[in-house]
Image (cartoon, grey):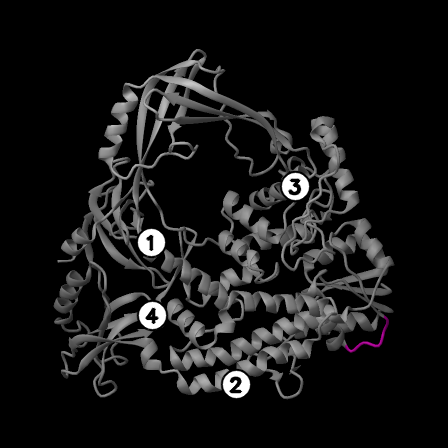
Amino acid sequence: MAKNLLIVESPAKAKTIGAYLGSDFQVLASYGHVRDLPKSKLGIETDKDFAADYEIIPKAKKVLSEIKSALEKSDELYLATDPDREGEAIAWHLTQALKSKKPTHRVAFTEITKSAVQEAIKKPREILANLVDAQQARRILDRLVGYKLSPLLWKKVYRGLSAGRVQSVAVRLVVEREREIEAFKSREFWTLDAELIGHHGSFKAWVVKEGTSVPLELDKQAEVESWKKKLDKAKYEVESIEKYLGEMKPQPPLITSTLQQLAARLCSFSAKRTMKLAQDLYEGMETGEGSHGLITYMRTDSYNMADIAKKEAESVVGKTYGAKYLPATPNLFTKKVRGAQEAHEAIRPTSFARTPESLKAKLDRDHYRLYELIYRAALASTMAPAKIETTNVKVATDQKIGLQARGRELKFDGFLKIYPDSDERFEKLPELTQSEKLKLKSLTPTQHLTEPPARYSEATLVRELEKRGIGRPSTYAPIMSTIVDRGYVTKQAGRFTPQDVAGIVTDLLIENFPDIVDYDFTAKMEEDLDEIAEGDKKLVPVIREFYEPFAKNLKEKEKSIDKKELVQEKTDKKCPDCGAEVLIKLSRFGKFYACSAYPKCKYSAPYLDDDFSKKEEKQIAEEAKEKCPDCGGDLNVKQSRFGTFLGCSNYPKCKFTKSIVVSSGIKCPNCGHDIVKKTTRKGRIFYGCSGYPKCKTAFWDEPTDKKCPKCSNLLVKKKSGLACSQCDYAEEVSEASAEADKK
């Protein structure tokens, strides 16, 4: 019979650790949290120092029963939950739920290896109350915001909405980026590139502004022709040559945010997917020699790496690539992440001897790809810098027009030899000499259109939150999922697009609860939580400082906020049923037209604000004249999350429905069928081939019958003009032509 019971969070970890500890230990999993705040009520006694009313999670009752039974037969209890605030809190909740009087020890390790686990068992400690308080403070603050503010949104906007302390800030970032994009005015300009021939070969140079190395920008194509004429007859010679040898230093090993960003860019993994794969690698994977933890703990914001790991990495580098790939002195990464918990390590392999190649046949594709990223990034961080020779050449002409050329030659690859994202481009210039005469081979004018900022992807949104000090490693992935699940944003081609409600809620919060969505205030709250963890602040004063003004303001705003101003817009339309004014209203399925005399008059119609409007309105009107084929009743226009449809007026007795399919008038470029307007399950409009599923051609933006001059694919309509559906070609539409199109 095992003398000791050790509790971890997951069965995979239990299996791996159980193999390291032998028969003296029984290892069981808690399957994460065992207690939490109740779902049916606030669960916080705001008048009693914010005491939390925790209860056993229903799914944890069976697990706790098994743990209690095992504990009765054991002499001592070891709690080996994750080495962060969340893990510390789970350990504390286990002690509260088990109420055991047997000796209880907290053990923590950042890697699941035999030596690390056995060393932790030898050096148990007490549960750290400060870390538990920091986790509880976050949970209580999030509950107070969510359970107090969400009902207000239900009353003032519509049911089903939610607010969150960090979630709402993330939504604000997405909304403000979309508004930047909408307000952006594209500018056309031209640049001129020349290909010049010297004694030892040709090279490319660009025409520069006088006295600078900055490319010359010409506003009109007519100007380009004028400059081309001057350059065609010009005489060219090398004015000056400058060379310098520089170093490119290695990147630090990965932390949670950079892991998510790199995995998104190189593997197209979502933040949630990345963290699930990393959790598996941390907890233990079958390697053919039993289950082993392959990486250190993946929720970290520290660039530190243990000395023993650095030495092992340096040994692998020296043996594999040679001594010249080792730096003269070990690399130090002094960059700090705001609020970083420096006691943790960066994410690294538990053994550098366990190369990705040795595991390729033992891991599935996604686990292997993530392990390879982590391994290469960690190993590269210990390597020598790359050495790059840069050559800058100034070219003079007798037309007093200057040109500039730049070459980069990789003299020593250093860490770039293995870094996972080493996509640096190096192009060497031919040998040139001072005053060397050059010949013009060709001139290439290039049209440019300034582009708006890109919508956030998961990776760039995580980076922005981290830069602002908002959120922590354990919260990034849940935030990304929450803002989609709550219907505030959708993802198109991996980028976040806000829905109408996101802008309405963001504006409401900025105007009435500015602290909730203030970037600096939210970052300050994170710092307060860090100070609780460090023992410099106490839980109750931090929560009280936030809650008391928040609660007072909430009470005032419940009376003063006018729902009609938020979710209703006036129109010049009249209700076809009763003649009253028709309003534009907002529901969870988007905007729709409704009679202002509701509930006396229940007229409603879909809100159409795109180029399909007239066509769709006409088609809907025609189809709505038909009778229900099942019972002969009238057909009413209805709207759901899946779009506009016709439904029988005798519902619920008759449940006949008919979808409305509207053709764009554009033929599919792949099969010739009509391109029709469709709606995703999330309520997002897109345009797809009516020949689906045989043909899966689809566009997020409305297609046109015009073709791209670069690649011959269809152009689609953007707010700034037309753009190619496949390549980067774009053209701006003038206001006059846009108005003409509408007419």
Amino acid at the residue labelled 3: Tyr
Going from the N terminus, do you reach mark 1 or mark 4 first? 1
Residue 598 lies in quadrant: bottom left
Instruction: Name the residue tied to disc 1.
Output: 184
Q: In terms of depth relative to the viewer, which is nearer, 582 or 251?
A: 251
At x 36%, y 60%, the residue is 179
The residue sitting at the top extreme is 199
Q: Position of residue 34 (x, y in %)?
A: 67, 72
Secondary structure category for the residue under label 4:
loop
Amino acid at the residue labelled 2: Lys
Instruction: Name the residue tied to disc 4.
Output: 589
| Pair 3/1: label in front | 1
Amino acid at the residue labelled 4: Phe
Secondary structure category for the residue under label 1:
loop
At x 34%, y 64%, the residue is 683
Q: In terms of depth relative to the viewer, which is nearer, 351 or 213?
A: 213
In the drawing, does residue 198 fall left or right of residue 699? right
**Tag 3–tag 1 contact (CB < 8 Å):** no
Q: In terms of depth relative to the viewer, which is nearer, 156 or 193?
A: 193
Instruction: Name the residue tied to disc 3.
Output: 375
At x 80%, y 52%, the residue is 116
Secondary structure category for the residue under label 3:
helix
